[in-house]
Image (tube, rainbow, N blue to C red):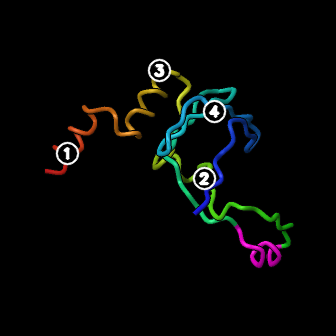
Amino acid sequence: MVIEKLPAKLSNKHYDYELVKRTNQTLMYKHAHGYEVFTNKIVPKMGKKVAERFGFKFKESVYTHKEAFPKDEEFGVRAFYTANYVRAIEIFDILEGSNQEWISYKNSAQS
C-alpha cells in the first residue's frame, strides 16, 4: 500500500491550513482562527471507474491510498478544534497516546 500524505499547506472549506506537527498517528494544523488536531485516517484513493462514473477527471498516480482530512461530522470523535496552542499540544499528546495520565485514566475507567 502506497499512501499519499496530507500536504504541509492546504486549503479546505474557506480556510488555509499549515501543518504544525505530525506523527504517523496524529496531525495538527493551524488556520486563521486556531488549531485542528486529529488522528490520521487512511482511505482508498478513487479508482478510474469510480471517477468516470461521477464525472471526475481521473489522475494516474502511484498512490493507492491517501490520508483524509477530517469531515465536519468527525469533530469530537477523531478531530478537535481549539484556539489555544498549549491546549492543541495537550490534545495532540492525548491522541498520540503519550500522555500517561490519560492512558491511566482510560485503563482505570475500563476496569
Q: For this view, does 27 lie left or right of residue 33?
A: left
Please report whichever mark, 4 or 2, sits nearer to the chain's N-terminal start. Answer: 4
Q: Is residue 94 magenta?
A: no
Which residue carries the number 2 mark? 67
In this view, 14 is above or below 18: below
Q: Position of residue 74 (x, y in %)?
A: 53, 52
> Within 10 Å of the Cα at label 3, are there few (<14), some (14-19), or many (20+) other Cα atoms?
few
Please report whichever mark, 1 or 2, sits nearer to the chain's N-terminal start. Answer: 2
* Residue stretch rendered in magenta on the structure: 46-54
Rendered image: mark on residue 86: 3
Q: Position of residue 77 (x, y in %)?
A: 45, 49
Instruction: Looking at the picture, tell me which residue is in the foreground, 84 or 8.
Output: 8
- Disc 4 or disc 3, which is closer to the eye? 4
In the image, what residue type sits under mark 2?
A: Glu
In the image, what residue type sits under mark 1?
A: Asn
Q: Position of residue 61 (x, y in %)?
A: 76, 62
Rendered image: mark on residue 107: 1
Rendered image: mark on residue 19: 4
